[in-house]
Image (spheres, rainbow, N blue to C red):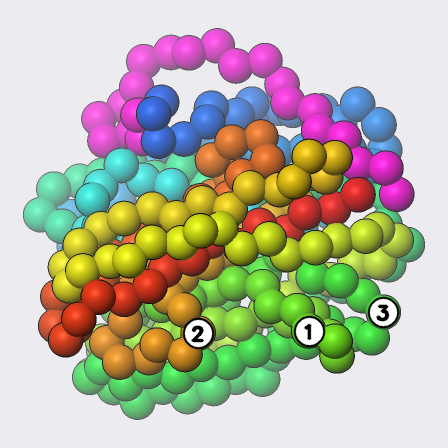
Amino acid sequence: MALTVALGLYLPGPIPPGEPPPSKIEPWSTSAVAGSADAPVFVQSSPVRVPAGGTAQAIATCPAGTQVFGGGESNPVSGTVVITRSVPWRGTWETTVRNNGTSDAYVTGYAVCGSGLTAYRQVHGSAVSVTPNGGQELASVDCPAGMRILGGGQWISGPLNVSIDASLPLSDSVSDRWFIRVRNHNAEIIGIQPIAICGSGLTTQIVSGGGAVVAPGEYKPATATCPAGTTLLGGGGGGVWYDTHQGVTITDSYRSAQDSWTIYARAHPGNTGPRGITSHAICGT
């Protein structure tokens, strides 16, 4: 499967209060059209206001004739707007965020859309319960045999006062999978469920970026870039998988350049030392 990228024309306009500045995200077209049946298309939602102390949902819709490969969200706030739920729904990618700050903010949702696969599946993992008041659990779901990971996310059942420590692709000699780790800040049990988007008919690789070391309370980005000759299909990231004490909170996860995937994360102020974060890009040919 040959992959190329088609982006629509972007005409800059007024930036709403709190909208991510151009230095943080690449502007995309909301009506991009693929140049061929197999070309991945990158789309964004309109800016969505998130009230202080509240939640909001950003929805990016794939063009007709394409399937959603993955997605995410970007916001301009330094660590107070956090991702809580990020999932495919029919032909869209829906990202829910929580604003833990004291003023309103704006977020933008993103989707990567494609076609031309010989097989496509959205695979939901088993639900895992997370104990209240700071409990943390991890979960993962494998792609079926012979299928490769394209993207993924996490469903949260219950109140959305949570922090996502990791939501990222993994691959080994056995299978591709999507891995999540979630902390529950509610006073009641919640359920978490990983979702993997899997396909066949293309060659993929997962590229890990250089990562970053984040001190307690610090807020930093990490970026992974696809090698020349490949095309970005999706991505994710978060705290390194083995580092579970307190950890980090993902605030943004999105395509930041033509072939790059970036996350922003804030380390928990109660950490006893620095934590590592990394971004992962899923690259295809």
**Magenta-colored segment: predominant secondary structure:** loop
Q: Amino acid at mark 3?
A: Gly
Give the vertical position of 247 relative to 39 (above or below): below
Give the vertical position of 245 relative to 203 (above or below): below
Does the rendering let one see residue 35?
yes
Residue where numbered disc 3 is placed: 146
Q: Quadrant of the C terminus?
A: top right
**Image quarter for residue 171?**
bottom right
Where does residue 135 sit, x and y in percent of width and height?
28, 85
Relative to residue 219, is residue 208 drawn left or right?
A: right
Where does residue 11 sit, x and y in percent of width and height?
48, 10
**Sequence order check, earlier mark of 2 and 1:** 1
Number of the front mark, 1 or 3: 1
Secondary structure under tag 1 reads loop
Residue 11 in magenta stretch = yes
Where does residue 114 sit, x and y in percent of width and height?
74, 41
Q: Amino acid at mark 2?
A: Trp
**Sequence order check, earlier mark of 3 and 2:** 3
Residue where numbered disc 2 is placed: 241
- Specify few, some or many for label 2: CA neighbours under 10 Å numbering under 14, 14-19, or 20 or more: some
Residue where numbered disc 1 is placed: 172
Residue at 27%, 66% (x, y): give it.
275
Residue 196 in magenta stretch = no
Residue at 55%, 41% (x, y): give it.
225
Residue range of the region highlighted in magenta in the rendering: 1-21
